[in-house]
Amino acid sequence: CGGAAGPASGADLTADLPPGPAPLPWAFVLLGLSAVAAVVSGVSFGLPSVATLAASLAFAAKAKGDPDRKPAVALGAAALSAVGLAAGVVLSYLLFVRGRR
C-alpha cells in the first residue's frame, strides 16, 4: 500500500470523458424574450419590455470584455426592448385610453 497512484488516478478517469454540455446562450435567450415582450407590451403599456430592457442592459454590462457572452446580442435585445416599450406605450394608449372616449 504505497502512496503511488495506479492506473485509477483521478486524472486518468476524467481524460476519457466527453466534454460537458455547452453553457446556455443567455444573450440569445434575452433576445427571444425581448421579442415576446415587445408583442405582449402592445397591450400592457410596455411593462414586459421594461423588464427585458433592464435585464439586457445588466447582462451587456456584465459581459463587457467577454466575447463568449455575446454582449452585442444583449445590446440588440435591449434595442428591441426599447422599441417594444415605445410601441407598447403608444398602442396601449390608443387601445385603452383613447379608445374609450
Image (cartoon, rainbow, N blue to C red):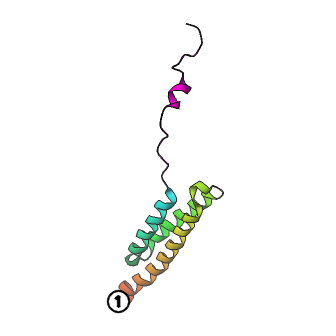
Q: Residues within 10 Å of mark 1 (few under 14, many from 20)?
A: few
Note whether 7 is above or below 80 in the view shown: above
Note whether 57 is above or below 45 in the view shown: above
Q: Position of residue 58 (x, y in %)?
A: 57, 61
Q: Position of residue 75 (x, y in %)?
A: 57, 67
Q: Residue at x 54, y 69 (%)?
A: 76
Q: Residue at x 50, y 77 (%)?
A: 83
Note whether 65 is above or below 52 in the view shown: above
Reading the image, the residue beneath label 1 is: 99
Which span of residues is magenta-colored?
4-24
Instruction: Please tell me in which quadrant of the rendered image residue 91 appears.
Output: bottom left
Q: Residue at x 46, y 45 (%)?
A: 21
In the displayed image of the protein, which residue is found farthest to the bottom? 101
- What kind of element bears circle 1? helix
Q: Which image quarter holds the C terminus?
A: bottom left
Q: Position of residue 23 (x, y in %)?
A: 50, 49
Instruction: Please tell me in which quadrant of the rendered image residue 11 appears.
Output: top right
Q: Position of residue 46 (x, y in %)?
A: 45, 75
Magenta residues: mostly which secondary structure?
loop
Residue 26 falls within the magenta-colored stretch: no
Q: Which image quarter holds the N terminus?
A: top right
Amino acid type for the residue under numbered disc 1: Gly
Q: Tell me if 51 is positioned left or right of 63 in this view.
A: left
